[in-house]
Image: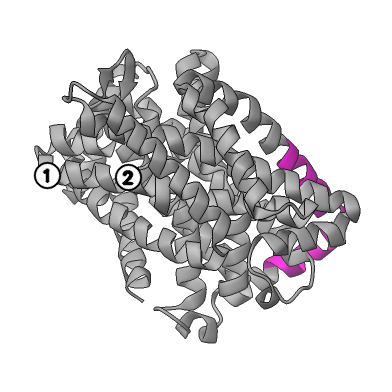
Amino acid sequence: MLVGYVTIIFFLAAVFWSFKYRFMQFRAFKETKAVLFKEKNKSSYQTFMVSLASHIGTGNIVGISTAVIYGGAGALFWMWVFAVFSSIFSLAENTLAQVFKEKIAGEYRGGACFYIKKGINNAPLALVFSICLVLSNTIFFQPIQVNTVSESLRLAFGIDRFLILIGLFVFTYFVIFRGTKRIVSFCERIVPVMAIGFIAVTVIILLCNIAYLPAVFGKVFREAFRIPALLAGAFGSCLVVGFKRSLFSNEAGLGTMPSISAMAEVDYPLQQGYICVVGIFVDTVFLCTLMGLVILLYDVNPGSFTGCDLIVHVFQEMLGKLGKYLAFFFLFTFAIATFVSQFYLGESNMYYLINKKRKKKPYLLLYKCLFLAGIIIGVNNSTKSIFHIVDTGIIVLGIFNLYAVFKLRKVFEAEIDRFHVRKDMPDIDALTNDTR
């Protein structure tokens, strides 16, 4: 119940900021194109791939399936709405990550704990937040990615959970624990393949069933505003489930993505903010929609499924035996990409905690042990029970991070001014003075 109410508050704050800054998040595609293609910034491209790896994960497949299972077709509409408004938080927090980043062990590190300490001068809160992020990327958020990997392998090939556990341990040792370069290289290779493959397959399915799409969209909009669905559960089952799954999918405002954004080298901090906004739209507005429409094309009772099994069932009904293995491929790759990128995210916050300690190895070993503990939790628990843990972790992170972002709004506005002066554009004061 509490999670639902806090999510609504997040949304209202996002609406306020979107109007305050005149929906400047919609400029993201133009600005991102300039950085990635015209300026050919390889650092930003690599960061974008790691960011997408973290964004494009179970939220796009299992997240959307659980949204339909527990919130109905209308939850998809509320996922769109939440993503559009909350992307302003992504613009702000990832801009701040660039402003307050620092070099540690030869690499740029940063994130919410850095701008909480250096920006609002609140070391105790920064300490608490960094601990929360370390735990989130080991035993709170990470298990849902592991659970998706485990369930996809079990459903596709009937592999025993213990063997899956051993396999994930081996993968973690040889890929994840071998440093940032190995993580970045892995994400550069897997993200384009899985994203393009997913888009191609889902678009083909939708085109083959294009005659049914008007009815599907009609169902989405009809159920989004159906009074019984809006009045059920914690402050509106359909609405709140859509908001929660959208927040889990794109993580805008939670302070998780800034840890990844800090590694990029850009001319202006706002550029990195715009790049991350594109990730939000690609993730929730585009990819979640494709998956949601594919699920809703098939007339199935979602209540008889728990998450991964719904995806496998729908793909198998649509494409036969090939569909079963395609479902496995997407479930597996989407989850494993997020799984890999989350290690880097949590590690950055562990570095913040131990930055001034002479002996860092024992603490980094502890972090790796927590990461392995998250694998054990993910393999041995149900999707539904893990999502309860995830939702609680989301709310804790969001409250701390948005408090800092609001406190640092003047820094954010200064970066907006600096960026637009550089581009020979009018001062942003015209956009913000009337609402301050």
Q: Position of residue 280 (x, y in %)?
A: 49, 43
Tell me: residue 156, above or below residue 384: above
Quick one: label 1, few (<14), some, or many (20+) residues within 10 Å? Answer: few
Q: Residue furthest left?
A: 121
Tell me: residue 167, above or below residue 67: above
Provide the major secondary structure of the magenta segment. Answer: helix
Dot 1 amino acid type: Pro
Quick one: label 2, few (<14), some, or many (20+) residues within 10 Å? Answer: many
Element carrying mark 2: helix
- Quarter residue 391 falls in: bottom left
Tell me: residue 313, above or below residue 265: below
Per the rendered image, the range of residues in magenta is 197-217
Magenta stretch: includes residue 40: no
Dot 2 amino acid type: Leu
The structure residue drawn at horizontal position 64% and vertical position 25%, both measured from the top left corner, is 189
Task: Indicate left or right for 114 with 247 as reference.
Answer: left
Task: Indicate left or right for 134 with 154 as reference.
Answer: left
Element carrying mark 1: helix
Q: Distance between the residues labelled 1 and 2?
A: 14 Å
Q: Where is residue 274 in the image (x, y as percent from the top left)?
A: 42, 33
Tell me the residue that label 2 is attached to.
Answer: 133
The structure residue drawn at horizontal position 57% and vertical position 45%, both measured from the top left corner, is 57
Examine the rendering and report whether any part of residue 223 can be seen. yes
Q: Position of residue 179 (x, y in %)?
A: 45, 22
